[in-house]
Image (tube, rainbow, N blue to C red):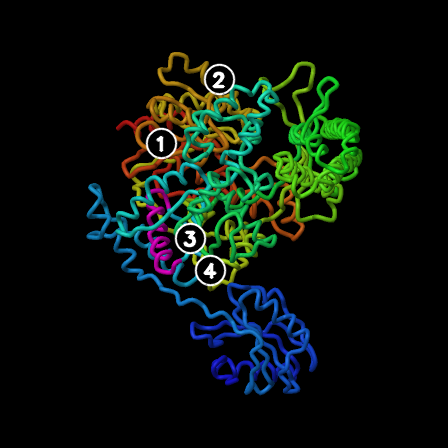
């Protein structure tokens, strides 16, 4: 074999040098090839002796950078050994080549040919930017077109990131127009290179905006026809078979019969089968009995396979150029690929190599939520009732349906005793956890609390054991069923139940062996049922047991950054202070090679210096003082009067919110606007009312810090009651803080402050949504000016007018600023 056809001259010289430096012993290399198949770059993976070398599998399996595996045989005999053939087989599965060379790099034996890279059609960056430039397509079809240079620059940088396989971290302020800036390059790339691109967002509103408004507009702007689809998790779709089976046992739904009948009638009319198309929000207990589940899916054997809503969506997605998903669904796909599905076949989503993350500031939170696991008595009881129910003296459930088909039918008689034991163990589990918590609401399991957790861990272990006995019983009965009898709905429903029960057993066992699994945070929490759900003569309190990953950065690096060709991150809030380090460190971007990372800030084009006033009362008590709540209950009504309503009040504490809302209603009797608070109605309806009633006020917390878009006169003042630091008793936050302290870091400056800054910036971002919007941000927490860390908050804000004066002076100036 002619070695010059496989390895470039410069790389051959480098190979000779590295082998010589290793004393002529065996050296393992990874290499990259160009479009012609020539190795143009190598990296030393490991060094051995004259007979053998260890394969560095972390390098060998880095599919995004490795095309071939190379090693030398010092003796000159290039015949592959059995060990070589084993490595070659793995390389072949990964579409990698495997070469053996001699020490002088004059001869080569090609064990496995590499798969040559597809020729990439790079984007013409200037042409891509021209679509949204003056004189371009957008200017010709838009009546109110105004060229945005910052949007053009963002688009060009995203196009360049696609061209160069980069991780693009791009902060784009409100009004930049980031959707067009990433959709146009994404569409151009997908069509030119016949690649599928995933666009992942954090909110349903943005997903719908992309599919209903932005992507159709991009078709008009580019003049190109392409296919796009919004994909949701299969649990969002009705399953025709499960709905039919549920209808056959309609009487078992007790108080939910009316809801079941509504869903049945709707399914006859719907074209999508998506829960979002229902005219009402079904209860989780009903929807989970009739929605699509992977384990309950009969596949080709299902009588409704040809009409399946999930299959229709998957067929549509298979040849889509752009697939819009939420972060949760994307992480479900990534998890499946990490666990063995690989990156070249369909998992939850069709295969892909490029992702755009919009609302990327929420990635850590979304991933943490997805990879957390929790347990409550309600989840277990629901699954138990599906398998085994006892009413009066009659026993029923899927277990007995399966038993009639099983050669192990007599074993079903054990179910009653085991289920009774499980329910008793659940009771003991809750009692022991309630005793452990006392007057606290949460408690983390770690070194300092492990002794206190002793009785609770015993109860958790006993519950894991009894649940395990029940799953073993179900398996035993299912194993006794012939293949011909496995088409029964009870078989498929039981598969789903068993998978979930086994997941809870693993969670309970991992709790008991927490000290061997320090990569997770283990904690319990006391919660309370809403009054409408609480039953008479029973405590409304219940226990949630949760396992949460301590960090998501490693998973993001191995599951996303390494295997993907390019990843784009964009949001209005990725920086803390003047850099991206905090966000990049928390999400794992810092693990990637520096030359792959591009970080740029694209500031909002809105005239903040003219249209926004930032005010802090310098006579407020400190936020941690006893007088602070009394102060805000006096200050908020005065500020509302100054703005004549039109105010969003953002809290970090629900108790503080409720108290201030009551005080405000008393203080502002006769005020003509509505004074609404989060929790008194559906969040969507509250927001719509706030938009429509110009003089209304909305007291809110949590989700209202982000994603709220109220342009115009309905929102002219945002009051931030306290700097949004995470409460110090949050178990995941404290575990992450402890991890920073253990390595000698400052958890307050490395975690508390940056996290609060990003949320603070999200809150401020609710105010100015259009170029002609005008208004005031009032922060009642004067730590922002009087503590050293406050400058990190203020330096993250847009340039605007700023006041630090007594409240009595601020109210007059606020009124003048808004209405002059």
Residue 197: mark in rendering: 3
Within 10 angstroms of label 4, few (less than 14), some, or many (20 or more) residues?
many
**Quadrant of residue 194 within the rendered picture:** bottom left
Outermost top residue? 670
| Residue for badge 4 | 565
- The answer to whether 338 is drawn above or below residue 419 in the figure is below
Q: CA distance from mark 3 to mark 2?
A: 51 Å
Name the secondary structure under disc 1: loop
Q: Does the CB distance between marks 4 and 2 fall below 8 Å?
A: no
**Front position among marks 4 and 2:** 4
Residue 648 appears in the rendering: yes
Q: Which of pointers 4 and 2 lies earlier in the amino acid sequence? A: 4
| Residue for badge 1 | 710
**Front position among marks 1 and 3:** 3
Q: Which of pointers 3 and 4 lies earlier in the amino acid sequence? A: 3
Magenta span has 182?
A: yes
Magenta span has 573?
A: no
| Residue for badge 2 | 663
Q: CA distance from mark 2 to mark 1?
A: 25 Å
Q: Which of pointers 2 and 1 lies earlier in the amino acid sequence? A: 2
Q: CA distance from mark 4 to mark 2?
A: 55 Å
């Amino acid at each position: 074999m002619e070695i010059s056809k496989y390895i470039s001259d410069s790389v051959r010289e480098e190979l000779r040098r590295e082998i010589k430096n290793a004393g002529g012993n065996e050296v393992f290399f990874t290499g990259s090839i160009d479009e012609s198949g020539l190795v143009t770059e190598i990296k030393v993976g490991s060094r051995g002796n004259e007979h053998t070398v260890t394969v560095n599998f972390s390098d060998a399996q880095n599919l995004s950078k490795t095309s071939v595996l190379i090693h030398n045989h010092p003796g000159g005999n290039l015949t592959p050994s059995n060990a070589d053939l084993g490595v070659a087989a793995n390389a072949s599965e990964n579409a990698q080549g495997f070469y053996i060379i001699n020490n002088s790099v004059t001869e080569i034996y090609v064990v496995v040919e590499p798969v040559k890279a597809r020729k990439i059609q790079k984007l013409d960056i200037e042409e891509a930017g021209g679509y949204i430039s003056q004189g371009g397509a957008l200017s010709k079809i838009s009546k109110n077109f105004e060229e945005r240079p910052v949007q053009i620059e963002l688009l060009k940088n995203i196009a360049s990131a696609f061209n160069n396989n980069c991780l693009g971290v791009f902060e784009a302020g409100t009004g930049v127009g980031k959707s067009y800036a990433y959709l146009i390059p994404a569409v151009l790339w997908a069509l030119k290179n016949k690649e599928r691109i995933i666009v992942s967002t954090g909110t349903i509103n943005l997903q719908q905006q992309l599919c209903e408004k932005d992507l159709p507009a991009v078709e008009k702007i580019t003049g190109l026809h392409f296919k796009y689809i919004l994909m949701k998790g299969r649990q969002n779709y009705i399953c025709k078979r499960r709905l039919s089976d549920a209808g056959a046992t309609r009487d078992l739904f007790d108080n939910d019969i009316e809801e079941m009948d509504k869903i049945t009638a709707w399914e006859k009319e719907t074209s999508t089968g998506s829960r979002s198309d229902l005219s009402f929000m079904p209860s989780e207990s009903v929807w989970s009995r009739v929605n699509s589940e992977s384990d309950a899916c009969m596949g080709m054997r299902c009588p409704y396979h040809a009409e399946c809503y999930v299959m229709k969506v998957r067929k549509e997605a298979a040849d889509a150029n752009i697939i819009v998903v939420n972060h949760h669904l994307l992480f479900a796909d990534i998890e499946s690929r990490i666990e063995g599905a690989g990156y070249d076949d369909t998992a939850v989503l069709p295969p892909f190599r490029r992702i755009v993350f919009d609302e990327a500031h929420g990635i850590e939170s979304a991933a943490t939520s997805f990879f957390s696991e929790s347990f409550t008595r309600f989840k277990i009881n629901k699954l138990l009732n599906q398998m085994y129910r006892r009413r009066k003296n009659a026993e029923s459930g899927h277990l007995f349906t399966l038993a009639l088909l099983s050669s192990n039918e007599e074993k079903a008689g054990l179910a009653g005793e085991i289920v009774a034991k499980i329910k008793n163990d659940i009771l003991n589990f809750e009692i022991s956890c309630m005793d452990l918590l006392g007057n606290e609401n949460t408690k983390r399991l770690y070194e300092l609390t492990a002794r206190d957790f002793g009785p609770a861990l015993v109860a958790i272990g006993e519950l894991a054991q009894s649940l395990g006995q029940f799953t073993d019983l179900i398996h035993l009965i299912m194993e006794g069923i012939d293949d011909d009898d496995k088409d029964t709905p009870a078989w498929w429903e039981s598969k789903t139940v068993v998978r979930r029960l086994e997941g809870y057993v693993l969670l309970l066992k991992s709790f008991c062996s927490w000290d061997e699994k320090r990569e997770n945070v283990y904690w319990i929490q006391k919660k309370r049922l809403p009054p409408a759900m609480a039953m008479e003569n029973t405590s409304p309190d219940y226990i949630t047991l949760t396992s949460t990953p301590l960090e998501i950065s490693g998973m993001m690096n191995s599951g996303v950054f390494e295997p993907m060709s390019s990843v784009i991150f964009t949001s209005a809030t990725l920086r803390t202070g003047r850099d991206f380090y905090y966000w990049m460190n928390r999400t794992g971007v810092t693990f990637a090679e520096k030359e792959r990372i591009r970080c740029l800030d694209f500031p909002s084009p809105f005239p903040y210096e003219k249209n926004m006033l930032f005010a802090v009362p310098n006579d407020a008590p400190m936020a941690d003082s006893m007088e602070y709540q009394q102060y805000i209950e006096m200050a908020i009504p005065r500020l509302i009067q100054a703005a004549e309503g039109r105010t969003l009040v953002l809290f970090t504490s629900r108790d503080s919110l409720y108290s201030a809302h009551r005080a405000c209603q008393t203080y502002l009797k006769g005020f003509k606007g509505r004074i609404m608070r989060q929790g008194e109605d559906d969040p969507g309806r509250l927001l719509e009312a706030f938009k429509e009633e110009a003089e209304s006020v909305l007291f809110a917390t949590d989700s209202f810090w982000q994603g709220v878009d109220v342009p115009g006169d309905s929102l002219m003042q945002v009051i931030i009651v306290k700097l949004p630091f995470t409460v110090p008793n949050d178990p995941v936050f404290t575990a992450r803080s402890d991890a920073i302290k253990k390595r000698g870091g400052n958890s307050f400056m490395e975690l508390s402050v940056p996290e609060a800054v990003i949320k603070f910036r999200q809150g401020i971002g609710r105010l100015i949504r259009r170029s002609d919007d005008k208004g005031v941000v009032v922060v009642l927490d004067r730590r922002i000016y009087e503590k050293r860390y406050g400058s990190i908050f203020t330096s993250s804000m847009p340039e605007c007018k700023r006041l630090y004066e007594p409240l009595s002076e601020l109210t007059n100036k606020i009124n003048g600023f808004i209405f002059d």
